[in-house]
Amino acid sequence: MRLLLFFCLSIVVSNVVLAKTSMEKVLINHNDSLCYAPLVSAAEKIISKKTHRLMTTLNNDSNEPVVISGVIEYKDRQSHINFAAILVNGQCRVKSTESFTFKLPCITVRQEVFKKWQMKGILNNTTLVLAHSRDAKQIAYLSDASDGSYCLVSRHNQF
């Protein structure tokens, strides 16, 4: 009985060890090992355990960014996510952009969702620019859409 239990546990543990994240699966055939770990780390921070799907337009030209795009499902909405990575002076720079809409005016979204973010500026009469209060590498753009009844949000991160 103990041997059977040990065998079953070892199968479960080995499957967990061999499991790969979606980002790892997308990057499996990509040659740029310098950007592999930063892209996987960025995806883990943004996506976490949420249901999602990623795809890539991998580029083997080291002067062009690697771009991975996808969709993340939240309880109340879906978002588009883009990760871009490029080598700069031998180091990988990763950025992400996540875009989604709320069925609320942006002023309400600002007060309810981004209340702790600091105002950075106004691009025009319908777009606010905000920065995360504890992480200046996070910027959000809130734009009124569809006669002001929706808010288009674009959240940018640098890793």
Image (tube, rainbow, N blue to C red):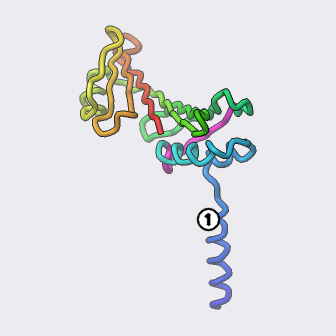
Q: Secondary structure at mark 1?
A: helix
Residue 158 x, y percent position in the rendering: 46, 35
Q: Is residue 85 visible?
A: no
Relative to 140, say whether 121 is above or below.
above
Residue holding disc 1:
16
* Quarter of the picture holding the N terminus: bottom right
Q: Which residues are magenta?
A: 47-57
Does 120 sit left or right of 58 as displayed? left
Q: Is residue 87 visible?
A: yes
Tell me which amino acid carries mark 1: Val
Residue closest to the far bottom:
1
Name the residue at 68% across, 81% down: 7
Residue 138 is drawn in which quadrant?
top left
Q: Is 54 in the magenta?
A: yes
Query: Where does the image place residue 6, in percent across and percent down from the top left?
Result: 64, 83
Residue at the top extreme of this rendering: 125
Please give left or right for residue 47 compared with residue 121 in the image: right
Camera-side residue of 7 and 65: 65
Residue at the image position 65 percent from the left and 76 percent from the top:
10
Q: Is residue 149 magenta?
A: no
Up-down relation of residue 72 to residue 129 (above or below): below
Residue 57: image x %, image y %? 69, 31
Residue 42 x, y percent position in the rendering: 51, 43
Quadrant in the rendering for residue 55: top right
Camera-side residue of 151 and 33 = 33
The residue lying toward the viewer, choosing from 87 and 94, is: 87
Q: Is residue 35 above or below residue 1?
A: above
Left or right relative to 142: residue 38: right
Crowd around label 1: few <14 · some 14–19 · many ≥20 (10 Å): few
* Point 32% across, 34% down: residue: 132
